[in-house]
Image (cartoon, rainbow, N blue to C red):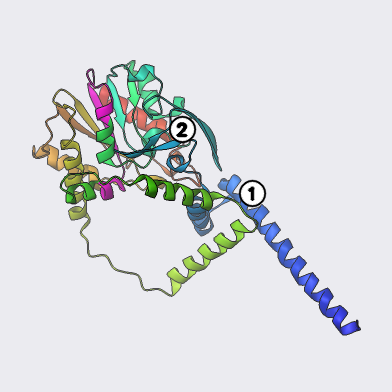
Amino acid sequence: MNEVNKNRIFTLIYIIFLILFTIVLLEIVSSFLMNNSSLLQGNLLSSFQKYYAKRDRKIIQYLPQCAVYDQSLSYTLKPGNCHIKNREFDINYAINKIGLRDDGVSLLAPEVIVVGDSHAMGWGVSRDSGFSHLVERKSNKSVLNAAISSYGTVREMKMLERINTSNMKYLIIQYCDNDFYENTAFSENNDKLNVMSQQKYNAIQEKHLKKIDYYFGKHTRNLISMLRKGIKAEFFEDKEKTTINPADESANEVSVFLNAIAKPSVDLSDVELIIVEINGYNKNDNLFINALKKRIENHSTGISAKKISTIDLSLILKQNNYFNLDEHMNPSGHEQVSKAIMALLNN
């Protein structure tokens, strides 16, 4: 082998080594930053948030050890214990016999029932730190946390049909802006819930497990791709101008929301409804709540409840009440929500 070929081989080996070393370094740095997300700021934080949500975060309703298919609700949580460790929390979810994150005692004719999605379920916080449990402790009322991750209002209300509501005095409904899609589909389908097949659920579950599975170079590949797409969208793609009036959009949200509440077989005539909106990453405004207030004031809700009240959290929840990477509230956020609810219960 002549000297030229030796130099070429050496150069190739050096380049391969340099590439592998760079990838290893980027993987280590990426993992370190996700595990210490307080160090992230601005666009870098935004990129890591997107990557974490799409490729790194374990989602409770798609983990075989945590959730099970349900022919009426698409899925429920799986009775027993479910342990989930994500970048900013390490939590054990204790699930009761009907698939809710609460104990068996709370199923015995609770006075207060909380329905909602992952925000109300207590994503990323211990059961004792969730606002449902905090309200129970502060009010001395029996409270059942009936919230399940990713449920919209329709499924939340259908879950009530499986619960002993004979002693229910208060129903706290946590609304999230993405409930709009399920509520709209329900309304457009002649008030029938579109339940996914078990085959589709299994496929989604399998896809999720593949997404969160780690392989060498995963962080580097996906983060670079997201950064590239972000730069392209920022500088080279035309921004679409929205022509939707926010007031009209909120009014439509309220209409399909109220339609979802009006349909279940559970009697609400002696129940006080408390509606609170909680969105991810503190994307809270008062548009939905204000539109709902107008319907309540005009007595045009179509709901035969004893009383309907709303809680506006748009000025209460701050960014420091949320995790950095994860879009959900941290314990301080749940504390703020519990205080707002208690202020209403004490009136």
Residue 32 - label:
1
In the rendered image, residue 331, in percent from the top left (x then y), is placed at 46, 32
Q: Are marks 1 and 2 in contact (CB under 8 Å)?
A: no
Q: How many marks?
A: 2
- Which residue occupies the foreground of this view, 43 or 144? 144
Q: Secondary structure at mark 2?
A: helix
Residue with the mark numbered 2:
331
Amino acid, disc 1: Phe
Could you give the CA–CA distance between mark 1 and mark 2, rounded to whole angstroms?
23 Å
Lower position in the chain sequence, tag 1 or tag 2: 1
In the displayed structure, 216 sits above or below 340; it is below
Q: Nearer the viewer, mark 1 or mark 2?
A: 1
Q: Is residue 127 above or below residue 256?
A: above
* Residue at position x 33%, y 20% in the image: 107
Residue 201 position in % (x across, y down):
39, 46
* Direction from residue 79 to residue 48 in the image, left or right: right
Q: Quadrant of the C terminus?
A: top left
Q: Nearer the viewer, residue 344 or 210?
A: 210
Q: Which residues are magenta?
A: 160-182
**Is 182 rendered above or below residue 10?**
above
